[in-house]
Amino acid sequence: MPRIPILMPQLGEAIAEAVIRAIRVKPQDRVESDQEIMEVETNKTNMGVTVPCRGKVIEITAALDASYPVGATLGYLEVSASDAAKAGFKDGGNSRKVKVPKNGRSPVRVDKKAAPDTAGVHFQVDEDDTFTVAETAAVRPTVGLPVPANASGATYLSPRMKARMQELGLNAADLSSIPGTGAGGRVTIEDFEKFVRQLDSHAQSPASPMRIAVADAMRRSCLRPLATVGRPVLMDRMLLHRKQSTFKPGLTLYVLRALALAIAENTAVGGRLVGDKIIHPKSIDIGFAVEVDDGVLVPIIREVNNRKLEDMVEPYHQLVKQAHSRKLSLEATGTGIATVTNFGSFGLAWATPIPLPEQNLVLGLGVGRKVPVWSDEVGTFVPATEAELTLSFDHRILDGGAAGRLLARVADLLQTPAAL
């Protein structure tokens, strides 16, 4: 009977690999079409791997806690010829209409008859002198990132240094803290080996794929000029509205809805600078930060400016629940234009959160505190609940004045919570 591979599927835009977290079948088990047989972890969520058709599992080649690229073979099924054909496999399961290499890389074709281009080449290697290095689909989770990005750190890396770093699973950003002793502050191989020996003397623990992804995202975010402004906002009307309402929205939802309405009044503030143009968003999609094990997830609520506050309460709680279980849908993990984070839940009064690389804005809410506020009605100070709002932004898009006006508009909208 035909034997067909079980492949790592494409798990979402810009996701190139995933870590195997659970294997739910074993060899000789019978499976049905689209049955979930594995659970994998990406930098955003946990997802399932399904089989393309019914059949019998004859081999599982994937290993738990190992990372595999999209298109990698995770195992094999024994199926009927008709089922193999329906699933898109042909030639007895040995090929497929859209063929993906087992290592997830596109094959490189070389025209041996074409004359080699030797212009500017110091030396030429004959075909008989070449050698190959055996590759494996399984790699350490710390090697490679779902979204490749140019690293910062050492400005020049010799071939010897690159080979040593590849051997250890490091990238150029890991060298940013090494003081170079070479010409012009260059990090030499001796500097690098000294750095590695020092690392070995410290306690170590493996970084999860999410931790690596967060680190890479924050590094890429800080390649832009970022700034933060802040101002206090009175919370009493919002807290009273929440107490009197039947749907009990969280404070994060109030702020999220107010930010969406403020951006909708001038969409340029939520835009992105590309070349010499500011690209305005088509939809006011805003995320909110949810702390999970070893990282942060940012579920997205779509078209927030067109949805009433009460209509978002149930979807908001569902997204929080899905984020904690690492089961967010692809729709909920797409790109938004801004993020809201309630750092006040950690007792923090002020913070400078960093926008995601693909976003321009992140709005933060601090902890509420009782403060004396002057009342013109009674002519004296009265106690009120006040919190700090912060807005971190890409300074190429907004200046301090524009950011301050946007923040002031959000604070004003929060004073009429019934209209949100």
Image (cartoon, rainbow, N blue to C red):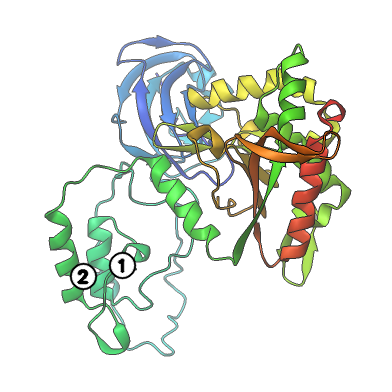
For the question of whether residue 335 can be seen, the reply is: no
Label 2 residue SS: helix
Q: Distance between the residues labelled 2 and 1?
A: 8 Å
Q: Quadrant of residue 393?
A: bottom right
The reply to whether callout 2 and callout 1 are in contact (CB within 8 Å) is yes
Q: Residue at x 36, y 30 (%)?
A: 20
Q: Indicate left or right for 272 with 18 as reference.
A: right
Where the N terminus falls, by quadrant? top left
Label 1 residue SS: helix
Q: In this view, does 334 lie above or below 59?
A: below
Q: Residue at x 81, y 29 (%)?
A: 417
The amino acid type of the residue labelled 1 equals: Leu
Where the C terminus falls, by quadrant? top right
- The residue carrying mark 2 is 192
Q: Which residue is drawn at 38% across and 52% down?
A: 144
For the question of whether residue 324 can be seen, the reply is: yes
Q: Position of residue 325 (x, y in %)?
A: 48, 22
Q: Indicate left or right for 204 with 201 as reference.
A: right
Mark 2 neighbour density, 10 Å: few (under 14) some (14–19) many (20 or more): some
The foreground one among 166 and 230 is 230
The foreground one among 139 and 152 is 152
Specify which label sits upstream in the sequence, 2 or 1: 1
Q: Which residue lies furthest to the front in this view?
A: 379
Q: Which residue is drawn at 37% across and 64% down?
A: 173
Q: In which quarter of the image is residue 126?
A: bottom left
The amino acid type of the residue labelled 2 equals: Phe
The foreground one among 100 and 179 is 179
Find residue 374 and name its label.
none
Find residue 175 and name its label.
1
Q: Where is residue 59 in the image (x, y as percent from the top left)?
A: 30, 23
Q: Where is residue 103 in the image (x, y as percent from the top left)?
A: 38, 46
